[in-house]
Each structure stands twice: as structure tokens, then as C-alpha cells.
Image: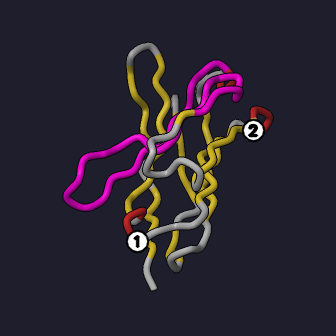
Amino acid sequence: QVQVVESGGGLVQPGGSLRLSCAATGFTFSNYVMSWYRQAPGKERELVAAITSTGITTNYPDSVKGRFTISRHSAKNTVYLQMNSLKPEDTAVYYCKVRIMDRDYWGQGTQVTVSS
């Protein structure tokens, strides 16, 4: 069955960096767009990065552009989110998502807390 499992979250000081990983199983990884979302307490879930199946095209909202980088490693069936210059407002649970035949598959999420 389709599974995506996030890891790499934690506590980091403002200005610091973290790299999140999402391990994918149960589908042909190289065929699908992969995305990262986040949800802060009391807020709606929002897209923070997406990458096409080839890895050639990426997409970011203005809030993270220039600080976050999404990438994928097809041989490892893994998508990454490198987060630099982290701010307290980046604090959220971060989720990996894949859409297959109009169904969204989400991971359990990984907590990122940016605080001094």
C-alpha cells in the first residue's frame, strides 16, 4: 500500500537549519509530483514546496522562497526539504503528500519548532 513517512523534525534556534526527509513506498515514486505541507496550531494546512516527477520544476510560496529547497532522490524513493534561515513562524507540523489517481496520501507529520 502507498505510504509516505516523514522524519527529521526537531527544535532549532531562529536562523538555524533542518532537513526533513520523506520516504515513499508502495508506488512508482518517479512517476509522481511530491509535496510538502505544514500546519501550525489554529491555522489551515498550507503548501510549502512541490517538485515534479522529473525533479526539474519546483514551486514555493513567497513565505519560504529562497529559504526552503525541495529535492528528490529516485534511487532512494525519498523527497527532502532543506530549510534554512528558519523563523519562529515556520513552527508547524510538516507533512509529505503524494496524489495518486485523485487520492491524497499523507504521512503522519514531523514537528518543527523554531525557538530560542
Given the image, on which type of amino acid does mark 1 rest?
A: Pro
Residue with the mark numbered 2? 73
Question: If you read the primary sequence from the N terminus, does the residue marked by circle 2 or circle 1 appear first?
Answer: 2
| Side of 4 where 62 appears, left or right | left
Q: Measuring 42% from the left and 44% from the top, which residue is drawn there? A: 37
Q: How many marks?
A: 2
Say the numbered circle drawn on residue 19.
none
Residue 50 horizontal/vertical position (percent): 54, 34
Extreme residue toward the right, this view: 75
Using the image, determine if residue 15 lies above or below residue 31.
below
Extreme residue toward the bottom, this view: 116
Is-magenta flag for residue 23?
A: no
Foreground mark, 2 or 1? 1
Residue 81 horizontal/vertical position (percent): 60, 50
Is-magenta flag for residue 48?
A: yes
Q: Real-space Cα distance between discs 2 and 1? A: 29 Å
Residue 83 horizontal/vertical position (percent): 59, 58
Given the image, on which type of amino acid does mark 2 rest?
A: His
Extreme residue toward the left, this view: 42
Q: Quadrant of the C terminus?
A: bottom left
Q: Measuring 68% from the left and 41% from the top, which residue is drawn there? A: 71
Residue with the mark numbered 1? 88
Residue 34 horizontal/vertical position (percent): 55, 32
What element does badge 2 sit on? Answer: strand
| Side of 50 where 70 appears, left or right | right
What element does badge 1 sit on? Answer: helix
| Side of 10 where 78 appears, left or right | right
| Side of 16 where 14 appears, left or right | left
Model colouring: secondary structure
Q: Quadrant of residue 42?
A: bottom left
Q: Measuring 59% from the left and 73% from the top, which residue is drawn there? A: 16
> Magenta segment range?
31-58
